[in-house]
Amino acid sequence: MPIEADLNIAEIPYDSGAIRFRYARVMAPDRTRWIRHGLFVEYHENGKLVSEGQYVDGKEDGLWRDFHANGQLAAEGRYRAGKEVGVWRFWSSAGIEEPSTNFN
């Protein structure tokens, strides 16, 4: 779907007021809903990252990273059109690499 609208930044808070989600979005061509398109970031309530990546036309696309509550990298891999592709790597909260998964 070609995107011809201006990007809009959404911020969704926790009940405490801290930001939980921040992402770019565009209005659907039929003007009935927002579609995630661009940078997406999710935060723990303490402000540290949970997840970051990109959306293209409402689907995850490109490099994504997930983090443990202590800030340690938990997972890293790629999406293409909303599906995991290639090798995804995983780490424990102590930073020890765990078995990877190949989504070919």
Image (cartoon, rainbow, N blue to C red):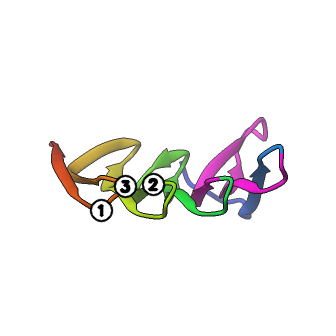
Magenta region: which residues? 16-44
Which quadrant would residue 82 be assigned to in this image? top left
Which circle marks residue 93 in the picture? Answer: 3
Residue under label 2, please give it.
Answer: 68
Which circle marks residue 95 in the picture? Answer: 1
How crowded is the residue under tag 1: few (<14 C-alpha within 10 Å), some, or many (20+)?
few
Which quadrant would residue 66 be assigned to in this image? bottom left
Q: Residue at x 62, y 50 (%)?
A: 36
Q: Main secondary structure of the magenta part?
A: strand
Residue ranking furthest to the top: 32
* Amino acid type, callout 1: Gly
Are the residues flagged by discs 3 and 1 in contact, CB closer than 8 Å? yes
Please tell me whether residue 24 belongs to the stretch shown in magenta: yes
Compared across the picture, whether 103 is left or right of 93 comes to left
Q: CA distance from mark 3 to mark 1?
A: 5 Å
Are the residues flagged by discs 3 and 2 in contact, CB closer than 8 Å? yes
Q: Residue at x 58, y 58 (%)?
A: 40
Q: CA distance from mark 1 to mark 2?
A: 10 Å
Return the residue nearer the eye: 93 or 28. 93
Q: Position of residue 64 (x, y in %)?
A: 40, 58
